[in-house]
Image (cartoon, rainbow, N blue to C red):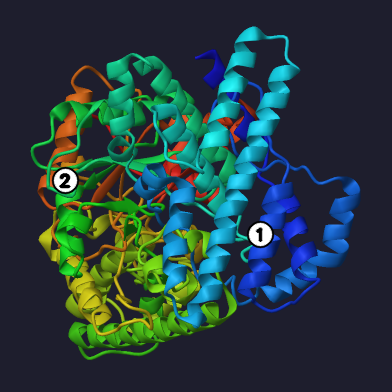
Amino acid sequence: MQRIEQLRKLPLKSSICPDEFFYIFFKNYLKKTDKIDAEVYADAFYDAFSHLTPCITEGELIVGKCDDTLSSEDRKDWEDNYLNPALKMTEGAILGQDSHMTIDYELVLREGLNGIIKRIDGYLENCEESKRVFYESCRKCLRAVICHSENYADKAKEMAENTNDAERREELLKLSEICRKVPANPAENFYEAVQSVHFITYALTINPLRIYARQQFQLGHPDRYLLPYYLNDIKNGSITPEYAQELLDCLSIQINNRVPNGLSSGYMVGGRDEKGNIVQNDLTMMCMQVIDDIRLVYPSVGLCWTEGMDKKYLEKACEILSHGRSHPAIFNDDVITKGLLSYGVPEEQAHSYIHSTCVEITPVASSNVWVASPYTNMAQLLLDCMDREYDSFDSLMQALFERLDKSIKDNFEQQNEMRRIRMEQSINPLLSCVVNDCLKEGLDIEQGGARYNWITPSFVGMANLVDSLYVINKIIFEDKEMTMGRFREILDSNFEGEEPFRQKVSNKIAKYGNDIDDVDCYFNKIVSHIINECKKYKGMHKNGNLIPSVFCWIMHEFFGRDTGATPDGRLAGFPLGDGSGPCQGREMNGPTASIISSTKWEHYQLIGGVAVNMKFSKKSLGEQSLITMRNIIETFLKRGGFEIQINVIDKETLEKARINPEAYRDLVVRIGGYSDYFVKLSENMQAEVILRTEHNI
């Protein structure tokens, strides 16, 4: 594993810099026009990829990445003469979301890019004239990627000729041979398949019309599409499991070389295939083992658990988590499939989905879904309602729902308008080649060519809202301890001079997450209302459903900074709750009570994503702990839980990392649907993670 130890350190020190590509692209493009033009785009795209410097690091077996390769003279030219015009030209293209998806890897591996070009040639024979430019631009962009891969082949051969290390020379010559073959042509073995998967993904990551929009394409289900190549190579003796593992490790390190920190990119394993058969094989295990091997923020791995899956796969996940890793997250395949079916996805497609970054679910190979679009601050909606007195708690709830409904409507209309602008001011021919049904319909993905075009808003601070509603009902309407106006005054002063009262509402009044029906029922009421309200809206593109979610990424900190004190005792500026589980530090009755509370409401229609965080003490782990952890996870899943993510760490380690960050540069923690390096988090976010209830098991 010396190679992996060497390669894993590089992303911790380096940054991702595709400026050379952007410079070449826009130097070519802006000479001809500053409008969106598919022919000009394709020419500039080909020119940029054919001249982009290939970067191969010593020891790499899987290649394709962007380093800072601009000369100082070219960088000055880029920044002085092209950057601002490029940013102005792409203002409309930068709106909304992208890359929260998985492309059609099976197509790429089966036919290669040349095979897709042949498909395009077929479409061109009988296409309407209005579609001809689209097809021709797609074809040229595919050829651009092939040219870039051939340049990598030349680079690897050149490096082989200039090394005195015989073993490395053979590796580089092999790599040259592979880059000459794939992704241009079908993959015929495991190594070729892995390189092909990475290279097309790396190429897609460089989107010239979204210059500084960070791309985070997912790798789908490698334990499905790579399995035939692996089994065949094992059978004929051309690969060993150990070497295959090394290739998977190298593939995963490269994710860290193409996706900046603070996002989420990876793959899923397990679940059921299109025929309903459980996916559980050697690659399922090996793709999870990657987490332990490389110990980086990516890949973000999801294990899709399904009823009847061999327990050893969940046990493997628990073992990895017990080492202090923040992955894999555990997803409920049965619940997610049910949810996809409820939104009209056919059953064979409903088994093929991806957590498109954190926990958002999008169908594989067919999506242009805008996830978390937008986030809604649920705690702030309640504070906005506390501007007057109410004659009953029901009238407060009615006012809250009216504000919520208006927020959903206004946000939907805004997102739909952004879709319209994006449709007019953006194209993505390369991506359109590998997403159903763009080529079939002759329609760019930005014009609605994808099969699914959902918009999935996320509702943040749900636990704060639930706890606050229960406190308000108790303090104002049941005990009549004070008026709404007086409570609002206390909140506006951030509980100044009212610490005994804050302690009372924080610690003496029941909270969500402790299996108390009178509190937990509010979560169900609010979620049910959101689901039904979202069903009223359809976006401008086909299959443009509005589908809700309750997770937060980093938005619980972002919203928390700007949200005043809340009735649940939370102080102004502190992060909101970190998902759909209880607020930080409020799980007083143990992990089982917490997951029971988190599963008293239906998860399956929240296909936009549900995240439940739990933290277990690393220092308390014993022989029985992994069994206990597995039982807790299984209880959550069997009760209909959507996804659960676990941190196994102790407060002392986190405190040490705050004091001495250099010694803990690769300490990864789970946040609110994604993972990040602890030492790179803001002080508020670090405090929030430390405050989370630490269960002993």
Give the residue drawn at x 40%, y 46%. Answer: 111
Asked if 10 appears above or below 210 in the picture, the reply is: above
Q: Quadrant of residue 189?
A: top left
> Which of the two residues, 148 or 93, is positioned nearer the viewer here?
148
State the image coordinates of residue 26 (x, y, percent, origin top left).
75, 64
State the image coordinates of residue 590 (x, y, percent, origin top left).
20, 41
- The residue pinned by badge 2 equals 636
- Quadrant (top left/top right/bottom left/bottom right) for the C terminus: top left
Q: Dot 1 surroundings within 10 Å: few (below 14), some, or many (20 or more)?
A: many
State the image coordinates of residue 30 (x, y, percent, origin top left).
78, 71
Viewed as shown, does residue 279 lie left or right of 210?
A: left
Question: Which residue in the rendered view is the most extreme toward the left?
Answer: 308
Question: Which residue in the rendered view is the most extreme toward the front?
Answer: 125
- The residue pinned by badge 1 equals 45
Q: Quadrant of residue 695?
A: top left
Asked if 246 appears above or below 109 in the picture, the reply is: above
Viewed as shown, does residue 326 lie left or right of 20?
A: left
Viewed as shown, does residue 141 lie left or right of 487?
A: right
Under circle 2, the secondary element is: helix
User: Between tags 2 and 1, which lies in front?
Assistant: 1
Tag 1 or tag 2, which sits nearer the N-term?
1
State the image coordinates of residue 236 (x, y, percent, origin top left).
31, 16
Give the residue drawn at x 23%, y 69%. Answer: 470
Q: Is residue 620 visible?
A: no
Give the residue drawn at x 24%, y 60%. Answer: 509
